[in-house]
Image (tube, rainbow, N blue to C red):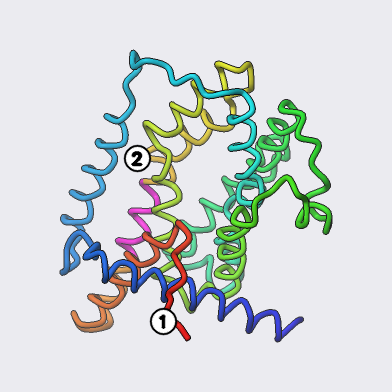
């Protein structure tokens, strides 16, 4: 309905992914292997999952993070978490959801928004946490929310990327798969359990982080599904095209994986 906005969204995505690709090349942080295979992908995935789980030490000394810091950190995540799963929002559309790839991505998105149950909608669960913390946020749908002085500008960078990317599901399939894997794997194990400890220490609900540590699990949860969908996509590419295109798509998956964090602006972009 708004061609100009759509063009701006595409430019935003291309700029973000381009910066991510340059960052990877300069840091020699390319894909963990060059030639794709399911065996290599599974070996990398298992190593990452084990490392994250091992990072959590239950009897480690508790870091005494101030209550105000815990609240502010949670607050800055609001623009992102209140659109949880939004990068996949169009994968339920006709022509996309019928494929192996589309069916898995839509299942992940459906879980994020509660599968039709308002009480299990992840943004709603986070809203309840914000109410506990007495953040007194404006309505998420209002301009007051977008311009609230409670947020740092960077709090909107990743959400804007997600929403922009979501407008072009067919164009950025490999990158979407990479972002999905990065997002679903990000907190499993150590990070979510540490966050749980911080919230519990200050008397806040731990439901949101416990839910994600469960639903994103690497055995049958979203992390496992994210690996499955990459395998399906790469099988489709290898069945219809040559090894050169498969290499290109795997590189694009990895650029997507590494684009979860905001890439730096280049001094020489002009």
18 displayed left or right of 65? left
Q: Which residues are magenta?
A: 224-232
Residue 160 in percent (x, y) is at: 61, 64
Number of other residues with Cα within 10 Å of mark 2, as a class: few under 14, some 14 to 19, many 20 or more? many
Residue 206 in percent (x, y) is at: 57, 24
Mark before the other along the chain sequence, 1 or 2: 2
Q: Is residue 196 magenta?
A: no
> Is residue 8 depicted above or below 120 in this figure?
below
> Is residue 152 depicted above or below 252 in this figure?
above
46 displayed left or right of 66? left
Q: Is residue 230 magenta?
A: yes
Number of the label disc, if any, that sits on residue 197: none
Q: Residue at x 39, y 70 (%)?
A: 174
Q: From the viewer's side, name the closer residue of 196 and 230.
A: 196
Q: Mark 1 and 2 residues: CB-CB less than 8 Å, in contact?
A: no
Quadrant where the N terminus sits is bottom right
Helix, strand or loop at disc 2?
A: loop
Which secondary structure is most common in the magenta stretch? helix
> Is residue 164 depicted above or below 261 in this figure?
below
Q: Which residue is mark 1?
A: 268
Residue 207 in percent (x, y) is at: 59, 27
Number of other residues with Cα within 10 Å of mark 1, as a class: few under 14, some 14 to 19, many 20 or more? few
Number of the label disc, if any, that sits on residue 218: 2
């Amino acid at each position: 309905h708004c061609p100009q906005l759509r063009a701006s969204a595409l430019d935003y995505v291309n700029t973000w992914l381009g910066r991510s690709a340059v960052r990877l090349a300069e840091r020699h942080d390319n894909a963990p292997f060059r030639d794709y295979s399911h065996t290599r992908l599974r070996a990398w995935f298992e190593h990452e999952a084990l490392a994250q789980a091992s990072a959590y030490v239950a009897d480690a000394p508790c870091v005494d993070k101030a209550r105000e810091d815990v609240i502010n950190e949670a607050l800055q995540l609001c623009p992102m978490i209140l659109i949880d799963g939004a990068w996949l929002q169009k994968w339920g559309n006709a022509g996309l959801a019928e494929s192996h790839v589309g069916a898995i991505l839509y299942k992940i998105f459906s879980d994020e928004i509660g599968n039709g149950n308002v009480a299990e909608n992840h943004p709603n669960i986070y809203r309840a946490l914000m109410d506990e913390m007495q953040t007194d946020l404006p309505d998420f749908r209002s301009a007051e929310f977008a311009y609230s002085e409670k947020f740092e500008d960077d709090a909107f960078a990743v959400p804007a990327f997600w929403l922009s990317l979501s407008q072009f599901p067919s164009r950025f399939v490999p990158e979407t798969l990479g972002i999905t894997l990065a997002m679903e794997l990000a907190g499993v194990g150590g990070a979510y359990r540490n966050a749980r400890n911080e919230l519990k220490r200050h008397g806040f609900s731990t439901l949101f982080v416990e839910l994600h540590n469960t639903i994103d699990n690497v055995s049958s949860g979203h992390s496992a599904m994210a690996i499955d969908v990459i395998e399906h996509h790469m099988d489709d590419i290898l069945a219809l095209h040559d090894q050169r295109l498969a290499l290109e798509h795997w590189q694009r998956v990895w650029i997507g994986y590494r684009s979860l964090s905001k890439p730096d602006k280049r001094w020489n972009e002009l």
